[in-house]
Image: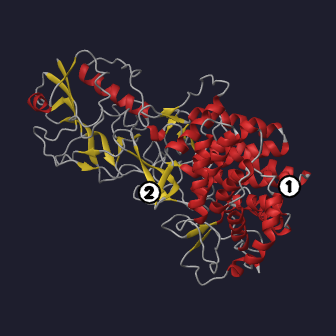
Amino acid sequence: MRCFYCPAPEKYHNDLLSLLPAEVTVISPEEAAKIALDPECTLFWEFPENIPGLSTKPAEPAGFLRAVAVSSCFGETLPPGRILMPHDFEFIPVTDPVESLVTLAKVAGYRQAEFGIPENSYPMLFRHPQNPGCLISTIRVSNFASGRFSVQVDWRELINWIFAEITGKDEVMDFSSVVCSVNPAYQEKDILPDDAEEKAFQKSVRWFCDQAVTRKDGREYIIEGFTSLIHPDGSQKKTELLRGDCNGEAALIYALAHANALPEAPEALEHCRNVLDSLYRGPLLCDHDVKSATYGSTFFSDTRHAVYGDDNARGAFGALLYTELTGDESFMPEIMRQILSVYRTTGTLGLRGCCLEHPAIDDRTWQSFFEEETTVCRPHYQATAWALNLQAYVMTGFEGFFTKAESAIHQAMDKHFPDFLWTNGITQEWGRMLLPLAMLVEVRDTPENRAMLRRAAVPLLEKMENCGAIREAVGAIGKGLYPAPESNDDYGKAEAALVHKNGDPLCDLLYTIPYAFAGLHEAACATGEKIFIDAADKMADFVCRVQAKSGIHPGLDGCWLRGFDYRLWEYAGNPADPFWGAWCVESGWTNAWIGATLGLRLLNRSFLCRNLAGCAGKLFPEIYRQMMQ
């Protein structure tokens, strides 16, 4: 029996050529067409544009289609319903009936198709009806490693099975020479170097300097990040949307580069000053209309004038840390206006509407928000604003800040915890609670406040794995804003949880890990208690290990992506979210907060700034008069 492999036309890197068994001969599509029906030959033919004896159509983009095993021939390692995720691929539609081994379909689920296979599906892998020895793949599989197909262990199983079939030898192929083009910096069991945190922080600073900066209209800004879609060569596209939060949060990294005396510090500070100037004084991201209810706040983006309190709080923390660590107080008037803008649009109970969207609120005054008894509690949208109020109280001594923060925290912990309304998952809501609670202890260190902080940490730490990851989970049905899809048809239509169901071995480095890490660090600083110190140390170990490294794609070297499977030890997850899928890179929410927490650990200091009272005290009375009277 003669064995042949016909690769797809050369367009992307072929990872299979170095893996082929010795008895397999590589042939052209023209040669494959001649032997496809020869019973004396076995053949694996990928992405064939014309198949003898079968009708096909021209290649089509797959869109939301994914590969799903439908045959039991692969054994327990690839059971029927197992999802294999290629990225940004094309397929050859086969119009004649064939018996699929793997099909292409729009299915919901992480590694298993949770709702079965829909009728509208397409063959991906099948035996030619006239020659069972001819295996045909309607997609390119040869770039499975360079194209970062997910999950890698499943693709290796499939490829191993394919070549075992055509050679007749049940031997395990040696994949050691083929690795993904983007990988975690360390494996789970690797021994980390003593300076692992310092190196991880410096790589994060380098990433912000080299990859996150852009220019528009002569000004410098921070990009939103990289989209989740992985191209066939393994690259991802930058998303150039300019967001208020990301531009403020980047200051965390740049300021800490200076404070840690990194070689990148001069470059980082120049970026920081330019970006903060663009954020607060440029025309795109700040509400400069003194008549607006949100005057002084920064917008969600340069194309959407929505004002989120939590976004503004996170950005303000970056600007405040820059001010304290550098002594440059030039942005303090804008920061104080931003703080008061969030404060005066917060209701009587300390809770604030999640999103104030222009032009819908153009006819409302700030007083109408300030006097409103808002009762909806969502830590995802509100908790960092509570922490900012505590920071503002430390700077100014104004009791109104403290009262609003304390009231909101008690609303959350006394009436809603732990069964919060949740956004993309319940763990992110618990994680967001830690920073304001830790700062409450730093401001008022009472037994009650310490007990409340410990109580808030319990459900989160119960989901901490030995490796330091937090196992992502969704909350009560009906309380989630963006749950996993509830049908195959729902897949890819809206924001969604990273897990499809509780128990999926995933952690979320966009919505949960950054805020849990920052909060655990702050709690360790605030209390000195072993439970928080140990948890923060364990999470630091984890984020150092899963920082992305790539010698091929510099845009992804030194960053953190959203989804990580801590059992398979690779970036993965339920990719139902078409906006912020499992492989997205978010400059502010993810990378600024993880990197900044590492930078603060190196300094052995907290996020809370304690040395700004002099400047804030001088500015506050007049800015308060302008904005609150």
Q: Nearer the viewer, residue 526 or 33?
A: 526
> Compared with residue 589, is residue 341 higher up or lower down, i.e. above or below?
below
Instruction: Say left or right for 104 vs 372.
Output: left
Q: Secondary structure at mark 2?
A: loop
Looking at the rendered structure, the kind of residue marked 2 is Ser
Question: Residue lying furthest top in this view?
Answer: 22
Looking at the rendered structure, the kind of residue marked 1 is Val
Does the image show residue 430?
Answer: no
10 Å crowding of disc 1: few (<14), some (14-19), many (20+): some
Q: Nearer the viewer, residue 62 or 254?
A: 254
Counting from the top left corner in percent of width and height, residue 609 is at 78, 52
State the CA–CA distance, disc 2 to disc 1: 47 Å
Give me the residue at 83% from left, 46% from top: 526
Split into 4 quadrants, where in the image is the N terminus? top left
Q: Nearer the viewer, residue 254 or 353?
A: 254
Does the image show residue 384?
Answer: yes
Give me the residue at 68% from left, 24% from top: 194
According to the picture, the residue beneath numbered tag 1 turns out to be 443
Q: Secondary structure at mark 1?
A: helix
Q: Residue 351 has which mark?
A: none
According to the picture, the residue beneath numbered tag 2 turns out to be 487
Counting from the top left corner in percent of width and height, residue 426 is at 64, 53
Q: Nearer the viewer, residue 300 or 68?
A: 300
> Compared with residue 208, is residue 534 higher up or lower down, i.e. above or below?
above
Q: Quadrant of residue 298?
A: bottom right
Counting from the top left corner in percent of width and height, residue 176 is at 42, 21
